[in-house]
Image (cartoon, rainbow, N blue to C red):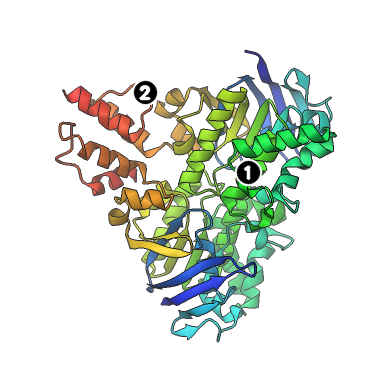
Amino acid sequence: MIEFREVTYVHESGVKALNNVTTKIGDGETVAIVGENGAGKTTLIRHVTGLLKPTEGEVLVDGVDTRQSSTATLSRKIGVAFQNPDHQLFSESVKEEMAFALRNFGFSPKLVEQRVSWGLKLFGLEEYSELSPLILSGGEKKRLTLACILAWDPEVVMLDEPTVGQDAIQKEKLAGTIRMLASTGKTVVVVSHDIEFLWPLQPRVIVMKSGGIVADGPAPDLMMKKEMLESSRVAEPQLVSLYRELSKRPSAPFVDALDARLWIEADQ
Amino acid sequence: MGRILEIADFGFRYPDARKKAVDAFNLEVDEGEIVVLAGPSGCGKSTLLRAINGLIPHMYKGEYSGHVRVGGASVESTSMKDLAQTVGFLFQNPENQIFMFTVERDIAFGLENLGVPRPEMRSRVDEAMTLLGIIDLAQRAPHELSDGQKQRVALAGVIAMRPRLVILDEPTSLLDPKTAMELVDLVARLKSDLGTTFVVVEHRLDLIVRVADRIVVMNAGAKVLDGTPRRVLFGDEAEGYGIAIPAVTKVQKMLSKDGIASVDRLCSPAELAATLEKQRQ
């Protein structure tokens, strides 16, 4: 369980990035955090790993204040794939990159080998295993950071803009991976602008604006609130738009039979 | 309308690579077109972009074949500096191209390098900031800005050079949906106001199709589809190449396939709803 209690975070420059945020993320939940650029989404997830400590309020992970835990302890429990993969890739080869954290966490050499080959396979990176991570494409780097994290099997997986640089096939695989994680009871938190990617996952959605939470609820409820979405600079998914537009026109076909869920299925 | 970009039988193989990254590639782009370049990861899009802005062959060495001409000049025999006056390049991550202490200094950087006289530089920087709606950020430090703002600063730096051809590499990927739509609108406006040509790599086609003139799909280093957004997205092949068909277009295709409704152009959700209502009446 991750709990934010009246969390405020003020940057050194004096800018308030989080403003009195209170929310809980339960074990096994799939949560999407959306909102305009600069709304505080990334700052929020950085507090969970203890990379940032609140200026006011507290962040609890399984009941323990992040100020009382080391980043090393927290990161064993919580894996974060940052928005810019260049911030977390540094090894000489893709294989070494994946093995690095596993060795640090004290996995046996055999287990390291097994987990590395599992991760490379899952994300289609096997052919690059001996190459430098720095020569991979942007999309491949993103997949590598995700593979690195999943390899040590954290309880919570946080993904900051995971679809950047991914084509439709990779996005589908990523959605499959998120569903797989959710089905094994992991907590998954996805920060993303890619509403079309998030919609079929039907997550709990937290909408942020100016450092605060402006809405929080299941995707089908929140995504129908057009005005709230617009004021938070979030677009509604195309299928929701179509549903809303058809509902306005009672004489258009299918309106009677139409249910948002039907359109979700159509998208899968 | 002139031809701004001509790629004829272009191929490139990186040193030590077994296969060519791009092979026997042909593409012609007319001035004022917005061309979307799509295709699965590793299909050669980045290599092609590098061949257009001159990074290939000037910075990346390898086996080069065929011709790439921008504004009539051969990329191979034109210096990067001269090319920079015709071709502008916006990276996916604006942090890769923003590094000065203030926004306006950053936008002026390219012009300073070209030795543009100061008064002219001033007016071009102001014009670019106005076009991109960032005049109030002029004195701010770029690293303090949000990603959307940084992206606009980087694009202002490109536009200030007044390039005839602008290459955008996934320009919306770090932007919130509304800011992304504003950027797409801005691209359309720069095309109509200045006649600028755009080649855009973009995975989120739902955002860009409404302003695109053409979609070119690459696969395994070759061009596999080239046509209007309608032709490419309504066809059956695009999905196989990892192209994200917008959700509303998928519904349109399902409706036509099942004979429920025929819609022969790409629609927004509102347009589709209106068309369906009309066909019912």
Q: Compare marks 2 and 1 and give the one earlier in the sequence.
A: 1
Decide if residue B128 is in sight here: yes
Q: Is residue A86 left or right of residue B241?
A: right
Q: Percent position (x, y) of residue A118?
A: 54, 62
In this picture, is A5 found above or below B35?
Answer: below
Label drawn at residue B135 = 1
Residue closest to the far top: B1
In this picture, is A164 found above or below B159?
Answer: below
- Answer whether labels 2 and 1 touch (C-beta < 8 Å): no
Q: Percent position (x, y) of residue B205?
A: 47, 36
In this picture, is B243 found above or below A15?
Answer: above
Q: Secondary structure at mark 2?
A: loop
Residue under the image location 67 percent in, 27 percent down: B165
Q: Quadrant of the C terminus of chain B?
A: top left
Residue under the image location 61 percent in, 73 percent down: A102
Q: Percent position (x, y) of residue A119?
A: 55, 61
Label drawn at residue B105 = none
Mark-to-mark CA distance, 2 and 1: 39 Å
Residue under the image location 48 percent in, 85 percent down: A64
Q: Is residue A49 left or right of residue B124?
A: left
Decide if residue B203 is in sight here: no
Q: Amino acid at mark 2?
A: Arg
Q: Residues within 10 Å of mark 1 (few under 14, many from 20)?
A: some
The chain letter under disc 1 is B
Q: Secondary structure at mark 1?
A: helix
Q: Amino acid at mark 1?
A: Ile
Nearer the observer: mark 2 or 1; the answer is 1
Q: Is residue B6 left or right of residue B269?
A: right
Q: Nearer the viewer, residue A180 or A69?
A: A69
Label drawn at residue B265 = 2
